Image (cartoon, grey):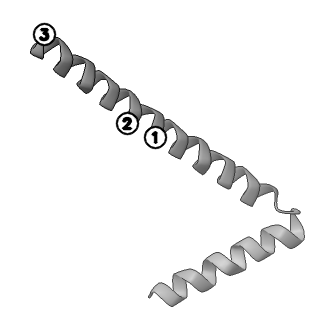
Amino acid sequence: MFRLILIIAVLAIGYDAVVHQGAYTRNTWTNLVALTDSAVSGAKQLGQNAREENQTRNN
């Protein structure tokens, strides 16, 4: 099953590279990176808030 999905992904990316000069792949990759960056930033902010809350409770 995994091999089939991998083959389909490779064919789709190859088709995009040949026909659309990689436009859809670049767009998808950019969106994925932005989503990951947003998740990391949110996790950092959550950790910062937890540390600050812990410090105010201990003081």
Q: Which residue is at 12% across, 10% downward?
A: 59
Picture quadrant of residue 22: bottom right
Q: Which residue is at 78% across, 76% downward?
A: 14
Q: Is residue 31 above or below residue 57?
A: below
Picture quadrant of residue 7: bottom right
Q: Which residue is at 88% across, 72% downward?
A: 18
Distance between the Cα atoms at labels 3 and 2? Answer: 25 Å
Q: For mark 1, does the 10 Å Cα neighbourhood hold few (<14), some (14 to 19), or many (20 or more) residues?
A: few
Q: For mark 2, does the 10 Å Cα neighbourhood hold few (<14), some (14 to 19), or many (20 or more) residues?
A: few
Instruction: Pick the quarter of the image with the N terminus.
Output: bottom left
Picture quadrant of residue 8: bottom right
- Measured from the top left, where is residue 28 in percent x and y? 66, 53
Q: Which residue is mark 1?
A: 40
Q: Which residue is mark 2?
A: 43
Report if the CB atoms under discs 2 and 1 are less than 8 Å apart. yes
User: What's under tag 1, amino acid-wise?
Assistant: Val
Left or right: where 42 falls relative to 38: left
Q: Nearer the viewer, mark 3 or mark 1?
A: 3
Circle 1 SS class: helix
Q: Is residue 17 above or below residue 46?
A: below
Q: Which residue is mark 3?
A: 59
- Which of the two residues, 41 or 19, is positioned nearer the viewer here? 41
Circle 2 SS class: helix
